[in-house]
Image: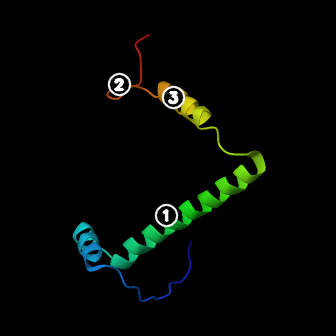
Amino acid sequence: MSGGTRKFSVTIPEDLAAVVQARIGKASFSAYVSEALSRQVERDNLRELISAAESQHGPVDRAGVEAKRALLRSDLPEQGSAGTSAA
């Protein structure tokens, strides 16, 4: 999302504001909030996509998902490995 900006006034809990301010220091609070909102929009879009797919194809097979995850994990190189082998 790009383009111009628009100013909003929002109210958030003081403790959350303090945590964010401590985390970002002198960086832009607005930029931090904008990034968080962008991530939320991405998650909302993904939920809508999953819902549409499930309504068309039925619910996701959790066992199948876990099997694919295990397969993907087994293809990853071990941590600390240089990723090459001597020939």
Between tags 1 and 3, which lies in front?
3
Tell me: residue 42, above or below residue 77.
below
- Give the mark nearest the N terminus, 1 or 2: 1
Residue 9 in picture, x, y percent from top left:
42, 89
Say few, some or many: other residues with alpha carbon within 10 Å of mark 2 (under 14 / 14 to 19 / 20 or more): few
- Give the mark nearest the N terminus, 3 or 2: 3
Distance in Å between CA atoms under marks 3 and 2 = 20 Å
Disc 3 is placed on an element classified as helix
Residue 87 location, quadrant: top left
Distance in Å between CA atoms under marks 1 and 2 = 32 Å
Disc 2 is placed on an element classified as loop
Q: Amino acid at mark 3?
A: Ala
> Which residue sits furthest top?
87
Q: Amino acid at mark 1?
A: Arg
Residue 25 in picture, x, y percent from top left:
23, 72
Residue 29 location, quadrant: bottom left
Say few, some or many: other residues with alpha carbon within 10 Å of mark 1 (under 14 / 14 to 19 / 20 or more): few
Residue 26 in picture, x, y percent from top left:
24, 75
Whether residue 67 sits left or right of residue 29 in the image: it is right
Give the residue at mark 1.
Answer: 39
Residue 43 location, quadrant: bottom right
Along the line of sight, the residue nearer the viewer: 4 or 30:
30
Q: Residue at x 58, y 33 (%)?
A: 63
Along the line of sight, the residue nearer the viewer: 41 or 31:
41
Q: Residue at x 77, y 51 (%)?
A: 56
Give the residue at mark 2.
Answer: 81
The disc placed on residue 48 is: none
Tell me: residue 17, above or below residue 55.
below
Between tags 3 and 2, which lies in front?
3
Give the residue at mark 3.
Answer: 70
Q: Marks 2 and 3: in contact by CB < 8 Å? A: no
